[in-house]
Amino acid sequence: MLFFYPAAMTYGCTRESCHFRDLATEFKEAGGQRVGISADTVEKQKAFSDKHSFDYPLLADTDRTVAEQFGVKRGFGISPTKRATFVIDTDSTVLAVINSEVNMNKHADKALEVLRAR
């Protein structure tokens, strides 16, 4: 799973990222690897990860190149990136795209459902 979140250390992104963390066993059993990504700096990502004991990598897409490639870059506004999760198979096939700006648990829950069904 590659999950894009708008900003580290914010309420919604913390809830979403912690839910991915809390389902570590379930993702491992389903063969899934979690990776979070936002436009935050490496330093902010590290602080976010350290504060919440994330057991998966966080990527810093500061110029939003990856967000643009995945179609989740916003042109302007308070949130530089749309909240979206991509479930990507080992052959690079995108199995699902999960979108929800307000249901923070939906991303991990749905991604897990997709992995279990494959």
Image (cartoon, grey):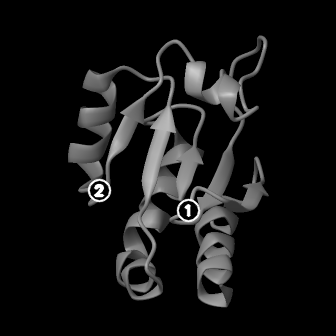
Type of amino acid at the residue the image marks with label 2: Phe
* Residue 87 image point, x, y percent: 62, 62
Q: Residue at x 65, y 84 (%)?
A: 118
- The image quadrant of residue 113 is bottom right
Residue 2, numbered label: none
* Residue 3 image point, x, y percent: 56, 49
Q: 96 and 12: which one is in front?
A: 96
Q: Which residue is mark 1?
A: 91
- Give above or below for 22 relative to 14: below
- Residue 42 shown left or right of residue 118 in the figure: left
Q: 47 and 69: which one is in front?
A: 69
Residue 54, numbered label: 2
Element class at badge 1 = loop
How many numbered badges does the structure rendering display? 2
Element class at badge 2 = loop
Q: Which badge, 1 or 2, is on the more N-terminal residue? A: 2
How crowded is the residue under tag 2: few (<14 C-alpha within 10 Å), some, or many (20+)? some
Q: Residue at x 36, y 20 (%)?
A: 41
- Give above or below for 17 relative to 67: below
